[in-house]
Image (tube, rainbow, N blue to C red):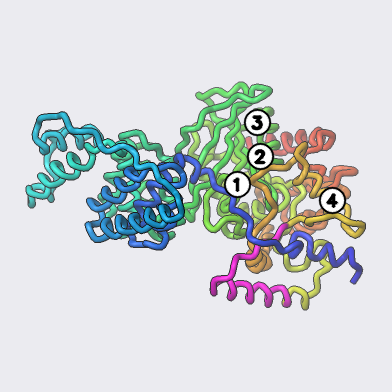
Amino acid sequence: MKLKNKFAALLLCLVSPAGEVVAQTPRMERMMDKKQQNIVTLAALTAVGDLDGLKVALGTSLTDGMTVNEVKEVLVHTYAYCGFPRSLRGLQTLVTVLDEREAKGITDNRGREASPITDARGKYERGRDILAKISGVPADAPKADYAVLAPEIEVFLKEHLFADLFERDVLTYVERELATVAVIAALGKGVEPMLRGHMGIAMNVGVTPDQLYNLLALIEKNVGRGEADGGRQVLNELLQGKGLATYSDAPVNTLENGVKMQKVTFRNRFLIDVVGDLYLPEDYDGTKKYAAIIVGHPFGGVKEQTSGLHARKLAELGYVTLAFDASYYGESGGYPRRIESPETRVEDFSAAVDFMSNHPAVDAGRIGVIGICGGGCYSVSAAQIDHRIKALATISMYDMGRARRQGVGDVMTYEQRMQSLDAIGEQRTAEYGGAARKDIRALPEKVDEHTPKYAIDFLDYYDNPQRGQHPNSTGYYSYTSLAPMMNFFPFAQIETISPRPLLFIVGENAVSAYFSEDAYAKAAEPKELFVVPGATHVDLYDRPEYLEITLPKLDRFFKQYLK
């Protein structure tokens, strides 16, 4: 095999193994400020008794600027929700951390003490009024059934919890509710009514839905997926009860040519938060319903690149459009980061349809999809099982399964594939045993005389600040993702998309052209293969001279089929 062919077989498959890369932080983990995130983490780890994790988190919180008294207050606060033993063990761990830091010459800021209580009323009255204030439930509302059965517990709650604790102003009401929700969510099953109640209180004192989803992302990271998913189910039901099935507190920004853009978040079937940019046309009329187009980005890409460009350009043509980050990438959620999961990538398209179908600006019967590069094969797979997608177009489509099984240009042999699967299995065994995760890059680390032109084209887009370079798009992903990708056959039942239309847009000189040609051959009518003369794979991402050809074609296609 020639060296060039060897390179082609490995590029976008096994090229350039690298060490662990710092994970991109999803948007949902940036919704709270650093102090709030530390409070949530401290409370959750204390609740589950993870003292090793708590020790690390305590050091991080102090280094990040929390005072000793603020940290101490969080640990004291937890006792009301997970008991004295957990709280005391947390405080004992804090003593150890402070002693160790002092031995290293670190002087931590003690911070201020709680202000003196000047209200001369009894604690019951004070606690009763605090509870009414933060919950929004009148003080004279009928008592809960447990309070009728055991009136002493109701006294304890109001006198001690909502007076003795909540009156201490070392932490704000928002911070106390974040700590409370974190503890209850970390406890998991059996306390769902309390979790729902305190999520409601948290929202009443100013915590946003995004921040609560953020909190649950931290629960997933620090405690477990099961506890986080249980919390998400409770929060979803709470929001739906408030008429907030979808949510976004992000501002609407007006871009050039009058297009409006808003950051939005929606959940997929796996309860992962998917983050997108929603684009509205310049003449958007809130009383009308619009045809909508969802745009999926290439493998390794993010919404700020070609998918966002296409979404914005199509919004200029009068569509409501959405470009989103795939799960595990960019601003979207999902742990661990940079996992390529074909099933999840396909699900993300259906989740985007869920969101758009429920958006007041969208006619749910007129939703189309565009998949670019790797997003193309995922969108084809999604359209086979999601009949709400009424029209599908792909641009420079890559069959990620075939590319991983056979390499670019089908130059990887069966024996080489089996060797790769052997190596992937060995890496999984090693990582389960504690070895560092192995990440690989989908692009070459360096260029020499043997580097194919199409690889240079990719680099000229993804590593070029004048084109597609973006900090959330590093090109790295987990080595073990290769196995499920090899097992992905996106065109297995492509003919079942019919009678919904398919449009494959491909560059005449694209290295990936054969993927679209094969898909077109397998698909049923109505279908079209649209070849752009002279264009390469990456040219169709953003080159103005080619967008002048492809955008009108897309517009005609969707106007014809999204009637």
- Contact between labelled residues 1 and 2, with CB atoms less than 8 Å apart: yes
Q: Tell me the quarter of the image containing the N terminus.
A: bottom right
Please name whichever residue, 419 or 30, is drawn nearer the observer in this view of the structure. 30
Q: Crowdedness of circle 2 by 10 Å Cα count: few (<14), some, many (20+)?
A: many
* N-terminal-most mark, 4 or 3: 3
Q: Which residue is mark 4?
A: 456
What segment is highlighted magenta in the picture? 419-441
Residue, disc 2: 304
Mark 1, mark 3: which one is toward the viewer? 1
The image position of residue 377, as x and y in percent, is 69, 55
Q: At which x and y percent is residue 473?
A: 67, 47
Mark 1 vs mark 3, CA separation in Å: 22 Å
Give residue 330's mark: 1
Closer to the camera, 365 or 474? 474
> Which of the two discs, 4 and 1, labels the residue nearer the N terminus?
1
Query: Whole-Å distance between the Cαs marked 4 and 1?
Result: 24 Å
Q: Please name whichever residue, 48 or 407, is drawn nearer the observer in this view of the structure.
A: 48
- Magenta-colored stretch includes residue 438: yes
What residue do we see at 64% from left, 22% from top?
Answer: 258
Secondary element at tag 1: loop
